[in-house]
Image (cartoon, grey):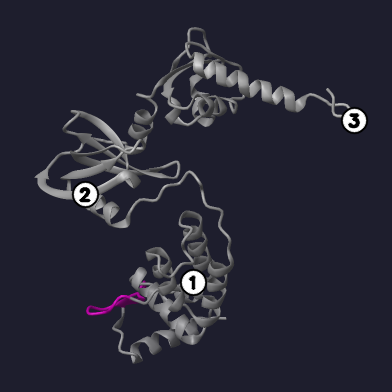
Amino acid sequence: MLSPTARALMAYEAVQGAPGITADRIAERLGISDRAARRYIAILREAGLPIESVRGPYGGYKVGRGARPAPLIFSQAEALGLVMAVLDGHHAAGDTADPVGSALGKIVRVLPESLGAQVEAVRRTAAPAPDRGAARPDLEITSGLVRACAQNLRVRVGYRTEAGSEWTAEVDPWAIVVRHGRWYLLCHSHAAGARRAYRIDRVTAVEVLPTGFRPPAELDPVAVLDAHLAVGWEFRAEILIEAPMADIPTWLSPALGALTPGPEPDTTTLTGSTSNPDWYAQQLTVIPADYRILDSPEIRDAARRIAERLLAAARPKSVGGAA
């Protein structure tokens, strides 16, 4: 049960969020009587908060000038939901030395004692299963890139490739996109004179420059990133799917390639590229329709290996272990 102080603060939050709110509306939100709602308004006024009455047939209450923001008040569901979301996305949420863990600890400490104890128990005892494919970037580097994106300022970035080679380039940072557990900087590279997408966890340094830029009009960062990730890799992929093009996005990630109408009605051609034919062939197995791998010998070989393993797994064996 919430304390009178907590209910008074919730009443203040209701007035601040909906100027002109009536006592019966406050009572409905807090699950109390109209009389109790007026009593909480009186408590707030006695505490020096400028709660003003709005006159007239539709009058109510509003917060006057000079008021400070209301303290944050969380319900149990909100507090637990916040902790669960942080644990899902950041697996160091229980580490007080980690920035996210430290911030979450501050929120827990200002909660009412009974609620805070429950939330802290979840934070300490939950055992998150980290996404092994996720790669979280450096907070300072990410902060610099976010600021440059927001202010439309060019940056000079240091970068280390997966193979270990390093280089520096000036880019116009269009947007930051979190995709498939990884953070990407979508940008225009002046050295390449083309669009690029860089893994932010591989950015080694950021210098924000005074030169401004204008991002592309009506930019859809997620769509552009997916299109970028689907091309330029070592092995070409061309797949003919016996299904209408409108059905394919519900089955496959856009990062697998571009979709175009196939040669026959209700067929679709998927064209892309990959550096990992085995991974690409695995993604195709979720398609609930017939498909053929065309001009892609590496992906065809990978699909054959997958099929052979599945057939072997489904083949019955005798009691002695022989097929």
Distance from disc 1 to disc 2, alpha carbons, whole Å, reads: 48 Å
Residue visible at 60% across and 26% down?
285
Residue at the outermost right position: 319
Please state which amino acid type lies under the numbered disc 2.
Val
Residue 160 point in image, percent of width and height: 29, 41
Where is mark 1, residue-wise? 29
Camera-nearest residue between 86 and 61 = 86
Residue visible at 88% across and 26% down?
318
Kind of element beneath mark 1: helix
Q: Earlier in the sequence, mark 3 or mark 2?
A: 2
Kind of element beneath mark 3: loop
Please state which amino acid type lies under the numbered disc 3.
Val
Q: Which residues are magenta?
A: 54-69
Q: Is residue 54 left or right of residue 90?
A: left
Q: Answer above or below: position of 312 versus 100.
A: above
Q: Answer above or below: position of 189 versus 33.
A: above
Q: Quadrant of the C terminus?
A: top right
Residue visible at 32% across and 56% down?
139
Residue visible at 46% across and 67% down?
95
Q: Nearer the viewer, mark 3 or mark 2?
A: 3
Where is mark 3, residue-wise? 319
Disc 1 and disc 2 in contact, CB within 8 angstroms: no
